[in-house]
Amino acid sequence: MATYTVAKAREELASVLDRVVDDREDIVLTRRGTEAAVIIPIQSYRLLQRVRQRIEDALTKMALAEMLEEDVTPLQEVAEDHSSKRANRRKKEVV
């Protein structure tokens, strides 16, 4: 993995991109001596995006499973309770 300063990468952008695209090399960019960014091949980026999506999906499933383990009132029960309360209010209005 090569490292370039941002200024040097800017000067040699075509060759930096050739190394990334043709040689599938990751390039680290530094700014003021600190690593600031990485240029990676698009295939690597797409793979990272798929992995990230799978992790997010797994975390969502875990959160949903955790919620279902809690004392959750089923939607049907909430709807029936709501209908019952509406019916009682109507009876009171009629009287």
Image: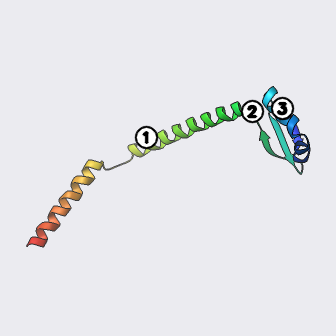
Q: Which residue is mark 3?
A: 18
Q: Quadrant of residue 83?
A: bottom left
Q: Nearer the viewer, residue 10 or 29?
A: 10
Whether residue 46 sits left or right of residue 84 in the image: it is right
Q: Residue furthest top?
A: 23
Question: Tag 3's secondary structure?
Answer: helix
Q: Quadrant of residue 91?
A: bottom left
Q: Residue furthest left?
A: 95
Q: Earlier in the sequence, mark 2 or mark 1?
A: 2
Q: Nearer the viewer, residue 40 or 33?
A: 40
Which residue is painted at 57% across and 38% down in the image?
53
Q: Is residue 57 above or below residue 23?
A: below
How are the residues colored?
rainbow
Q: Earlier in the sequence, mark 3 or mark 2?
A: 3
- Work out how far the residue at label 2 is from the one at label 1, CA to CA, in angstroms: 36 Å
- Work out how far the residue at label 3 is from the one at label 2, CA to CA, in angstroms: 10 Å
Q: Which residue is mark 2?
A: 41
Whether residue 75 sits left or right of residue 49 in the image: it is left
Q: Which residue is mark 1?
A: 65
Whether residue 12 sits left or right of residue 21 in the image: it is right
Looking at numbered disc 1 in the image, what kind of residue is underneath it?
A: Ala
Looking at numbered disc 3 in the image, what kind of residue is underneath it?
A: Asp
Whether residue 26 sits left or right of residue 46 in the image: it is right
Looking at numbered disc 2 in the image, what kind of residue is underneath it?
A: Pro
